[in-house]
Each structure stands twice: as structure tokens, then as C-alpha cells.
Image (cartoon, grey):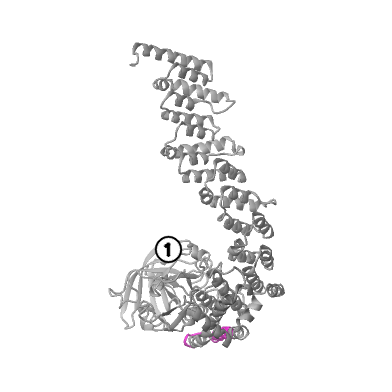
Amino acid sequence: MSRILAIQLGLFAVVTSFRHAAYGEDSRNTSCIQFNSVAQASYDIDTLLSAIQFDETKLPKLFQSLDNPLRIQLVTDTTQLFNAGFNGSVSGELNFRDPNGSEKKALVSLRQRGNQRRTQNRIKPLDMEILEGDSNSKADSLFPTSRSFDLVPHPWGNTIEISNDYNQNILKEFYYYRLSNILNDNSRLARLVWIDYMDKDKDKGQIASGLGILLEGKKAMAKRLGMAKLEKDTPEVTHATDEGLSLANFSTETFEHIMGNTDYSFNGAHNLIPLQPSDSDEISFTPYDFDHSQNIGLYSSAPHVDLQKSILGSLYKVHQYYENRSNATKGRLSDSQGLQQLDQAAVIHTAALNSLRRKLKQIDQAKTLVTKLEFKQETRRALLDEIDRFRIAATSILSQYSDYRKFRSDIMNPRWISKNAKSERAPIGQIFYAEIGLASSKNLKDFNHFLDLITEQNHRRGSLMQYWKKFKSLNPTENDLFSLLRSNAIVETHRLVLDRWLEDVSSAQDFISVVKGLPYPPSEAQRRSIHDLILEKLDRFYKLHPSDIEIGMLKNVSALFQVDLEITKKGIYLAQNSGEFIAAFTAPASMNTPVHSEELGKLLTTNFSQFQKFDPNIQDFNLLKKQFRSVEIIEWITQNSLEKAKNPADFIKAISMQVETPSNDYKKSTHRIITEHIKKFSSLNPTAKDYFELKKAAPYASTVLAINAEEEVNQSMTSANPRKP
């Protein structure tokens, strides 16, 4: 330890980008969390090195008695609100007593939320928005106007019977929220409540009653902590952990390990709230929704987490994250990267171990919660065992790996990884070792080797998506992609891998090559999946500015009528000029059917005003006609194009037959157009030569006779009214 401390002090002396920040009461006056002075490095060793205390006087009034249940009464249309599949909101009334014993009322809007609990609960989880608070003064109000809360109900199942087992589950989940307040720097406040559900129809009266949890609204929490809440679909959140864990999120992950909770993911922020401080680009995740945790008991399938392996894996993720942020060589550290890199890694390693030490000190505070809350004896024992299990695992890690070089020689050694992974039978153990190997891979051969160590396909898919950026950083070719698909053949993996790959292609030709180029016969399910993926990725395809030939090639990949139409629709919608509009109608020969032509014709007539906005010329109209095989549609296009004819040459171009061997129907159509619009032609002041060219385009002798007759009339009128020189 003395050696690592010396390394830290030396690094602090030479790295000029270190900065110091002290967070006190004044620096975050909306927060109840106070921090001691912390040294911060350019790679953000942050508040994990600090101590945390809660000052309840700084909390919103509702949460100033966190462990004392508040009795509330919800009066609403319970039949509509708890109807399965109902997605609307229902107004209601919230009744309660304030700390002084006075009866209070707030008007609320209630809406169902959640996923699994929503489908399996008779009493649904709710979003509760306060429409009119219980007091005009926010300082005096428990439920201020415009504030939102999440309400976790007590029953689990499709009954409304009061059950002490259900109440025990709520107590255990509430315990995890309070544990989060102790162990996490940025945590969500929760208040234990006893809820009476009352129907507004007095004949129905009370329909259920029991313990529940009232959770601080996500936006209110972000404001209290002085942070911004990010949306789950932002790129920073979608790929949050592709490159490891920041120290802040190492704290969050070890908290999840303590609970034995596996129902969370940084990638996409599943059961996590993504927050970003105003003075940092690092994202901090706050955990919530702990019903999958080991000791709550709602799911018998919850795996018993090997805490020592989990913590060890999390320590490695921290190194990944800071390696990538400092633009060091991707993958595991090597001696060739120099002493300074090792020194930085040692400082980071020590910072993470300090986080574990801090948790060991704080975990004793959690024991007092177990005695304060009204747990059954067996529940109390299970929670205490959980705390002790973490203490044993964390202590073991601290004793084995306090020296960073020992940590590096084990966990960053590919042979050590492979040996341990192959000896593991449990999927969670395989994943632990394999993901370390994936992150440290120097080439595609190693990457595929470590991926193959995970025997269960669904777990393998999850790890592949987690380390997709690592895979791409190894510069795979299209053949490498197909090799990866061949060894991970289930449809869901195919779909996700192709989806990620297509996001990075640089040309329409590459896009087509990937979706059509599988070097092995895909199954029917894979083929359908590819068709669906093409439709999902059409925006991406058209952003690559495909030619009409490339659009036709993409349509040929599926050779499905419905897919062809969707490709056409998207091309029409995204067209920025007449050329792109025309290209969207490119149809492969395999689609040359009357039904297909009819549907394309409907699309054209419906969207023709868009085409006209591009101010097309006669040549554009003729190119558009070449995309169709229906004589009726071609005639309709020709009729419209004649409005653009400004001289005899334009007219002749517009009516000229666009096929080498026209059918009789095509000839009849051309005859009809010429005879119906011959007056239009004469109005363009044609010469004898122009009439001669028009006759060359005539399909029948009768058409020529009609042109001759019009020419004679035009000549006689010209003789009677000679043009002025």
C-alpha cells in the first residue's frame, strides 16, 4: 500500500491537470448531500473518495421522516384506473394528515406505469401528478402543485386481499431505497406509505389497503442534486457502458451486487436514471425498481450473484473506461505503455478500492435500518446475511488485490481468463470471465474466442452487444461480420448484429452488400428478420443517397411486394429533388405484375403534387414514365407532362413512345394523346419540319392523317394572318 500511495503522491505532483473541488452546503443549495474536499484528476476521480451524510432538514418536507409510514387515501375511479391495458389518465383526490395532524387534500392525475408489475398486479404501479397542491406555500406543502411522484403498490398478484407477505416485500424494497441513500452519492428518495384505495362510487368504498412506496419524481430528484436528467434514447445513454464504468457508476454497480439484483443495465438505462452534472461530461446512474433483488423473493429465478467475481469484473470495467477516456491504447495495459500509464491505472485502482472501503464502513449504518423497520425474523436474517456476504467478498478483494500489479497480472492475463472461464459451469461465471477477455482482445481471433466461451446464446448476444464498439475497433471486414453471424446463428442475434453494422456503413452499395450477401442460406426466420430490418433502416439507406440502380438492387434483395412498396414510400417521403423522386419508383423485373403496377400508380397519383413542386422538365417526365409498365399510368404522366411543353420540340419529346417494341395498347394510347392534343401542338407555332417530326412519332396512318389535317388548317390560318417579320 505504501508503494501505491507513493505513486499517487508522485502523480499528483506531475500531472498539472489535477483540480480540487470541495462540495459543501453552498455549492449545491438544492441538495441535501454534503461532500468533503475531494481531489479530482483530469480523468475524473470524483466523489467516490468522499464521505456522505444526509441532513434531513435539507430534504423536501415529504421526505423528512423517511422511515415513518405516511397514511394516504386515494379516491378515484378505480375500475377505469386499474383496467388492464388502460393508457389514459384519471383524476382523483389525495387525502392525508400533515405532521401536525391536520387533514389535507390535493387533486391529482393518475396514470398506470411500469411493465411486469403492471401486467401481473391487480393494483397497478402509478404515476401521480399533483394538479392542485395541499398548500399555496411550497415550503408548507407535502405535495406541491406540479410535482410528480411514482407510486409502488403493495399487492403482487391478481388479488386485492391484504397480505402480510406482500407488505414484507414492500418493506424489503423500501430497505433497498434507504440502503441506496446510504451507499450511493446520487440516490432517489422514497417514503413508506400506507395506502387506502377508495373508489369515488361510495357504494364500492375501499377496494384495497396496504403498504406502498412513494418515490421522488425523476426530474425533481435531478433538480435537487443539481443535475440534468437525460433521456434514455440519447446516444450517451444508449451506449453508456460500451467502454467500461466510471468510478461513479462503479459505486452504482457494486450497490446492485450487494442486493443480488440483475434486473438493470447501464446500456439504455434499464431501471436506472441517467443524470449529468453541469460541470462534467460523465453520466451518473441512479438505481431504482428493486423487485428482482435476491431477497425480495418475487422471482424464484433470481440468480445468486458471486459477489467476489462481480466486484472483480467491475474493477476491470473501471480500467476500461479510464483507458479509453485518456486515449490510451485500447484493450489491456501492457508494459510497453510506460510507467506513467501504469501509475495512472494504479491511482484509479486505489480510488475504486477506497470506494469499497467506504462502503464497508457505511454498510454498518444499513444494519440499523434492518432493526428499525418491521421485518419478520426470517426477513431480518436474510438481509443481515446479504450485508455480511458483501463484507466477506469486499474484504477478500481488498486483501488480494490491494497491489495493482497483482490485479493486473491476474485479471488482464488472457490465459488466466480462458482457464477460469472453461472451468465455470454457471452462465454468470462464464460471462464474468468472457467479458473481461472481450474487453482485452487485441485482435478478432481473440475476440471470437472469448465470445465462444459463453455457451448460452442469449447471454452471448448480450455480451456481444455490450462490447460491439470493441469489435468494431478491431477493424472487421464484411467477411468477419459474416463469420460472426455464422457462429451466432439465432435470429435475434442476426438482427441486432446487422442493425449495429448497418449504422456504420458508408455507402448504399455496402448497405445492399450486407443485407443480401450472407454466404450461407438463411433460414426462413432469418430471411423475414432481414426484410423487417430493411424496412427499419430505410432512413439510413436513403441518407446514403442511393442511385436508382441501387434502389432497385435493394428491392431485389427481398423480392417481396410489400417491402418494395415500403421502400418506394420512404423514397418519396425523403426525396429532395425530381431525380430522387423518380428513383424511388425503380422496380425490379420480378415485380412486373398488374397488381404491383396498380399500387405504384396509386402512390404516384397520391404524391404527384410533391413531384410537381420540384419543377420537373420534359426529360424528368420521360424518366418517370420509364419506371412504369402500365399503359394507363404512362398515358396519365404524358397528359400531365404536356402542360410543361413550351415549344413543339417539348411536345414531341413528351409524346414519343418510350419502348422499342410498343404494344397495341401503347400505340392506341399514343394515338389518343396526339389527336386529343393536336390543337395544343399547333398553338406552339410549329414549322413544317416540326409537323414532320410529329408524324414520325405517330403510331398509325390514321394518326398521320389527323396531323396532316391539322397542319393544313394551321397553314390556311397562317396564310390568312401572316406573321409579322
* Farthest-out residue, front: 14
Q: Is residue 674 visible?
A: yes
| Residue 31 sits in quarter | bottom left
Quadrant where the C terminus sits is top left
**Magenta segment main secondary structure:** helix
Relative to residue 452, is residue 569 drawn left or right? Answer: left
Q: Position of residue 539 (x, y in %)?
A: 51, 50
Q: Which residues are magenta?
A: 371-391
Is residue 388 on the magenta stretch? yes
Label 1 is placed on what type of residue?
A: Gln
Residue 451 or residue 344, whichever sits in front:
344
Residue 215 or residue 32, whichever sits in front:
32
The correct choice, above or below, for 542 with respect to 276 in the image is: above
Q: Which residue is mark 1?
A: 80
Crowding near the residue tagged with mark 1, few <14, some 14–19, many ≥20 C-alpha atoms within 10 Å: few
Per the image, label 1 sits on a secondary structure element best described as: helix
The correct choice, above or below, for 640 with respect to 358 in the image is: above
Quadrant where the N terminus sits is bottom right
Q: Position of residue 162 (x, y in %)?
A: 48, 77
| Picture residue at 34% right of the left edge, 11% below the top | 720
| Picture residue at 65% right of the left edge, 73% below the top | 433
Q: Position of residue 236 (x, y in %)?
A: 49, 65
Relative to residue 41, is residue 224 drawn left or right? Answer: left
Is residue 126 on the magenta stretch? no
| Picture residue at 60% right of the left edge, 50% below the top | 510
Relative to residue 675, is residue 298 drawn left or right? Answer: right
